[in-house]
Amino acid sequence: MPSVSKSIAYLRSNDGLRAFLAVFMVAVIGVATLGLPVVFGGATTTAEATEPSPEMESYDSVTQAESELGPADDIYLGDNESAVLHYEDDSDVDKLDMGMDVSEGLVHMLVVDDIDDPDEELESANFSAMLDQQGLSGSGSMVMERPDDLESFDADVSGEVSEDTNEFDASTSGTFDSQSTSAGTGSTSGEVSVTADRFETSGDVTAEMDSAGSGSDMYVDASLTETSNGYTVDVTQEQTLTQWTASQWETREQARQTLQEQYGTLATSLGGTSEIEITNYDFQEGADGQSQVDISYSVTYTGIDDGIEQQLTDQLTADRSTDLTRSEAREIAASVTDVELEQIEFMLDVSDNSMDAEWDVAIANYDELTFAMFDLMEATDTTGQLPEEQLENARAAIEAQQAANLESTVSWDGSAEQSSDEITFDATVTGDTKNWDAYIDELESRDMDAPHDVTFELTADTDGDELSMDGKFELEAEDLAGQAINSWAESIQSSESSTMSPETEEFVSALDESELEVARIDAGLEDGTVRVEAGARFEDMSKITDTLTDSMSISGVATEQHDETASMYVYVDDMDGIDTASATKADLEHLDVVGTETTVHEAGEWDDDLPQADTDAMSEFLETEDAENTSEDGNDDEDSDSVPGFGIGAALASLAALLTALVLGRRA
């Protein structure tokens, strides 16, 4: 069984410190690695944890770590084999406060420090997030100097997913400085509408520039319609030709042969036929080597559906990665040709200094194709890596969309204008879902969970010389804290890029089994001072601490700081079976944590008031109310000045890297 000295040395080593801090930061990992739902459309996913490759000092053994770091500074012996281990070291951090109480399942950390080279453009920022059994919520804001090339900016984004609605709105506008030698305008608008078996989209794009183009004007107006035995393509085309391509169009017969080569090859390859009819033809030869062709024609395809079905059936049957009979392959192929191309229209008009494009598309009856793709995925999953439950849930969700006639629509409208000295833009995007409440009812009737309730807001604007941003989000989900840690643990354990020792495997499993109940992080930056505060509560923290040592039972940790000296007190309930009530230094000298300069305070001979973890304050920090504004009320001492936080990226990514570094680099 490892000695107490090895356990303490491990705690003081770089990897050991990461193990200790991991207990503090494990909840934050849940926040950082949790994938927010793809709210528009109702799907929910969970993102995999990232595996950064941090640089850290490492040791070949715990014994080496002991010799490098030395013994404890003080050991306070108590009754019943208990002790308090005191470590003292220099600290260049303005404020460091860490606490842990295993019986209460509480951990907490507060760090306040000055940044050596603060970013003068960033004036202040704050971020706060809380993860608990009811969900995830967070908010943040940032104020920075307005960039020199940004004259004005305004953005407003919001969205909501609930039992009754699924919608979002986004708008933005602004002006940037420009040093362009040309000017122009551009705009676009359109809409996309999707149901379980129908897709529609229409829109337009226009652009105009004051500079001359290449001189190759072109106009194309094309449409495709489905007939009872094939397809018809109607095209009107006007195009400027070069001297190398003019010969392909200079007579009506040459034009027909050119079109036959372009369109007939497809029909031949699919075992069908094509017929081309030219309804209008005009060719004008230019004196400058450029010619102009104006032509209208129709292409009629017949018999190509049979060719598509035959070729797909052959390919699917011959594919060794699938387990399909020919009859099953034929059904999948037939679902492809059953898709109805109700309307496909496209227009493009390109002139010397302008471009206009329009489209109108409607495709229907692809629900059978969707289900056929599920069959294909199931057939190709010969190793059983794709859970059958996921496929069945996907099928049921499509069926629920059909039954509810769910329709999701996204619309947009945007424009931009460029002059010699500035660029202005204005854009809006909106999303809405019809029959959403009926869809929720259909899911519940199939014993499926409805998408989690989500709300989010983000605003940004310029005011004088400042650019400010504010945002908040809330995700409601039962037992989200536990799911987040479980997802993180599974991601680490299944990662192909990490090879874990049995000890690390045990530690990751312990994190999962410790039953995270709530976690919170606040982070801030203002006037060159950074403040990070984080905490968590577990139902059974002993599962984690038991993996750190086999020889002693850690019950708590507390710290204190005086000027540039920081002390950590580790409370131990069991000192490897030593009778601490009567032990002297001589009884402990065989332990490597005891050195010539270690002061051993025997039981009953010391009455120092050693710092304890403040469980009341730790619990209060984890209260769910007003999570984003706690730093405004922290006036307990002169070091707890209110300092707004980082953004979500900097705070959570760095803390996520810390814990992932522990898991991937932990030593036995």
Image (cartoon, rainbow, N blue to C red):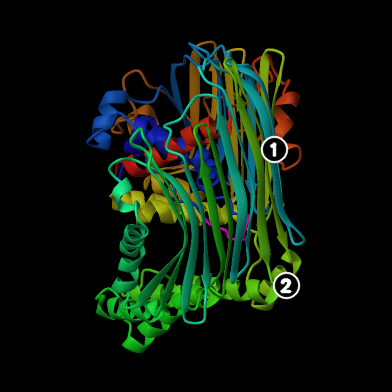
**Which quarter of the figure is the C terminus placed in?**
top left
Q: Is residue 137 magenta?
A: no
Question: Is 300 situated above or below 637?
Answer: below
- In terms of depth relative to the viewer, which is nearer, 580 or 466? 466
Q: Quadrant of residue 622?
A: top right
Amino acid type of the residue tagged 1 in the rendering: Ser
| Callout count | 2
* Label 2 crowd bin: few (<14), some (14–19), many (20+), radius 10 Å: some
Q: Mark 2 touching mark 1, by CB under 8 A?
A: no
Q: Which residues are magenta?
A: 39-45
* Secondary structure category for the residue under label 2: helix
Question: Is 350 situated above or below 153?
Answer: below
In the rendered structure, the answer to whether residue 4 lies left or right of residue 238 reads left
From this viewpoint, is residue 497 visible? no
Task: Determine which of the numbered discs, if any, sits on residue 441 in the image.
Answer: 2
- In terms of depth relative to the viewer, which is nearer, 585 or 161? 161
* Secondary structure category for the residue under label 1: strand
Q: Earlier in the sequence, mark 2 or mark 1?
A: 1
Q: What's the magenta bit mostly, secondary-structure-wise?
A: loop
Q: Find disc 1 in the rendering and name its residue.
A: 171
| Residue at 53% over, 31% down | 651
> Could you say where residue 27 lies in the image, as x and y percent from the top left?
55, 44
> Could you say where residue 23 lies in the image, as x and y percent from the top left?
49, 41
* Label 1 crowd bin: few (<14), some (14–19), many (20+), radius 10 Å: some
